[in-house]
Image: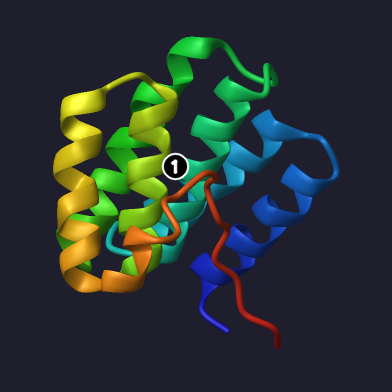
Amino acid sequence: VNEEEVFHDYGLALWFAEKPMDAITNFEKSLAINGTFTKGLNNLGCALGLGAVLGKLPQQMIVPGIQQLQQAVSLSGDSILYWRNLVALLRFANQDEAAASAYQRLVALDPHSAQDPPQDCSWEFSFR
């Protein structure tokens, strides 16, 4: 197991234990070890974005959440999960023009997404 995975998985556990700030700290540690760790970017983006939407974090935290997902799609442009999550956070943030553009990219990658628009940010994890 790579070291970034340890911090990432601990961050995910902390999120579900209702400790969002501790979760974010550990996601950030995973990215300090490996700045191109897209799973960490995705889940940090979800933690920041959902934390803001759910009132667990200040509302302005959705902006860095979107930025993390933008970085994830720039590194892994064919990931349907990352595009879905980016669309969801952009919609939550009322960034309609950017959301529409990201949604077009998503539908180009996955035509089935046209019938199932993103409504939530989805976590990425692996069972070991």
Crowd tier of the residue under label 1, counting other residues whose Cα lies within 10 Å: few below 14, some 14–19, many 20 or above: many
The kind of secondary structure element at disc 1 is helix
Residue 85 percent across, percent down from the top left: 41, 50
Residue 113 percent across, percent down from the top left: 36, 63
* Colour scheme employed for the rendering of this structure: rainbow
Viewer-proximal residue, 25 or 54?
A: 54
What's under tag 1, amino acid-wise?
Gly
User: Could you tell me which quadrant the N terminus lies in?
Assistant: bottom right
Q: Is residue 120 above or below residue 105?
A: above
Q: Which residue is mark 1?
A: 45
Q: Is residue 128 above or below residue 68?
A: below
Tell me if I can see residue 102 in this picture. Answer: yes
What's the residue at 55%, 56% (across, down)?
122
Q: Is residue 30 above or below residue 67?
A: below
Q: Is residue 73 left or right of residue 123?
A: left
Residue 118 percent across, percent down from the top left: 45, 50
Farthest right residue in view: 17
Question: In which quarter of the view is residue 55 placed?
Answer: top right
User: Could you tell me which quadrant the C terminus lies in?
Assistant: bottom right
Farthest front residue in view: 115
What's the residue at 41%, 35% (across, down)?
89
Q: Is residue 128 left or right of residue 117?
A: right
What's the residue at 51%, 52% (across, down)?
43
Tell me if I can see residue 34 in this picture. Answer: no
What's the residue at 28%, 56% (across, down)?
72
Number of on-image labels? 1
Residue 98 percent across, percent down from the top left: 18, 32
Question: In which quarter of the view is residue 64 placed?
Answer: top left
Viewer-proximal residue, 11 or 46?
A: 46
